Image (cartoon, grey):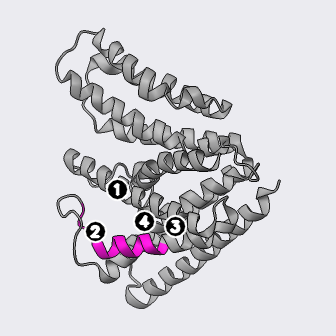
């Protein structure tokens, strides 16, 4: 498989970064707070530990090829959808539509992605699910907060299923001269967006003082945003050799996905504040829920997919 050397080099590079981060985290703990009473250091080490688990899981899926990647992101979508819908308004009349979201719409969307049926998976949720899911609730006759209930379910499907499914959908792109290596695009996308997230946190802690949106997030600063986006854009451009892009094109794509990733985090923070919660869940130590880790990728993936499809296929 021609993608294997590039993929292995990328995974080894990420492994080296995590080893260095682990050593730094342990040194900071030993020198500053050996009793574990420094929340910043403990949070940093919890994030690093969680990253080890996520990278190992992603690596296994990548090495398993398209079935492994499609199944992994279908499971992530299921978990994210559960987290999202837990915070939304619902009534007994919505039970059938919610069951349909989990056990019909989600599996069908990923089945279509697995089949490479672009003409249908591109419109299945925005058109068919959008129109038919409210019908199921309306037939039960409950009108109280109907629009709110329906809109929140549709938003959950769009964010947690439709947008996330564009990550494995990258495997269906047919790029001349890049056949069999699309899994590298997924690795590049996730690495670039997540590096931007991490570096926004680091730059923000080191130099951040001016908040981007004080009412939405107390940790997103202009210094963190600029430093994180520029760092990840530089790293994404430096990895152009494993993509179908030139270095300049890779820089442009990296800038686009990191900005979309930031906007995704901002929008999802607004939803959390509206719902009165800090995190979407508590399953990933140091990271919150699945949606807390996916929010930036959720917004970046569809844009990255369609830019790549439009200009390179």
Measured Cα–Cα span from mark 1 to mark 3: 26 Å
Residue projecting furthest to the bottom? 31
Measured Cα–Cα span from mark 2 to mark 1: 14 Å
Comes first in the chain, label 2 or label 4: 4
Spot occupied by residue 155 in the image (x, y as percentages of width and height): 34, 35
> Which residue is depicted at the point 47% across and 58% down?
257
Residue 50 visible at all: no
> Which residue is depicted at the point 31% across and 16% down?
137
Q: Which residue is mark 2?
A: 219
- Kindly report which numbered mark, 1 or 3, lies closer to the viewer in this rendering: 1
Measured Cα–Cα span from mark 2 to mark 4: 11 Å
Q: Which residue is mark 4?
A: 197
Measured Cα–Cα span from mark 4 to mark 3: 16 Å
For label 3, the crowd category at 10 Å Cα-Cα, with few meaning under 14, some 14 to 19 and many 20 or more, is some
- Kindly report which numbered mark, 4 or 1, lies closer to the viewer in this rendering: 1
Q: Which residue is mark 3?
A: 49
Callout 3 touching callout 2 (CB < 8 Å): no
In the rendered image, which quarter contains the C terminus?
A: top right
Local SS, label 4: helix
């Amino acid at each position: 498989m021609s993608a294997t050397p590039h993929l292995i080099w990328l995974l080894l590079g990420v492994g080296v970064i995590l080893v260095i981060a682990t050593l730094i985290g342990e040194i900071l703990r030993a020198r500053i707070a050996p009793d574990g009473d420094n929340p910043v250091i403990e949070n940093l080490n919890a994030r690093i530990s969680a990253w080890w688990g996520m990278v190992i899981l992603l690596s296994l899926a990548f090495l398993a090829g398209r079935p492994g990647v499609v199944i992994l992101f279908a499971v992530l979508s299921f978990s994210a959808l559960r987290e999202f819908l837990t915070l939304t308004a619902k009534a007994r009349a919505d039970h059938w539509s919610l069951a349909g979201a989990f056990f019909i719409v989600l599996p069908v969307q990923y089945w279509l992605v697995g089949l490479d049926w672009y003409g249908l998976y591109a419109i299945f949720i925005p058109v068919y699910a959008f129109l038919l899911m409210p019908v199921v609730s309306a037939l039960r006759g409950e009108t109280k907060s109907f629009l709110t209930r329906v809109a929140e379910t549709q938003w959950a499907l769009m964010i947690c299923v439709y947008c996330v499914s564009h990550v494995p959908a990258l495997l269906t792109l047919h790029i001349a001269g890049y056949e069999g290596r699309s899994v590298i695009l997924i690795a590049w996308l996730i690495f670039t967006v997540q590096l931007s997230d991490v570096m926004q946190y680091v730059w923000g802690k080191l130099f951040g003082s001016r908040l981007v949106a004080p009412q939405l997030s107390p940790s997103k600063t202009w210094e963190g945003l600029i430093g994180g986006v520029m760092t990840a854009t530089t790293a994404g451009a430096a990895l152009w050799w494993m993509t179908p892009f030139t270095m300049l094109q890779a820089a442009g794509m990296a800038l686009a996905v990191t900005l979309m990733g930031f906007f995704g985090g901002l929008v999802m923070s607004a939803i959390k504040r509206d719902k009165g919660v800090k995190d979407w869940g508590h399953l990933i130590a140091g990271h919150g829920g699945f949606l807390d880790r996916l929010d930036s990728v959720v917004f970046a993936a569809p844009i990255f997919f369609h830019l790549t499809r439009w200009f390179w296929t």
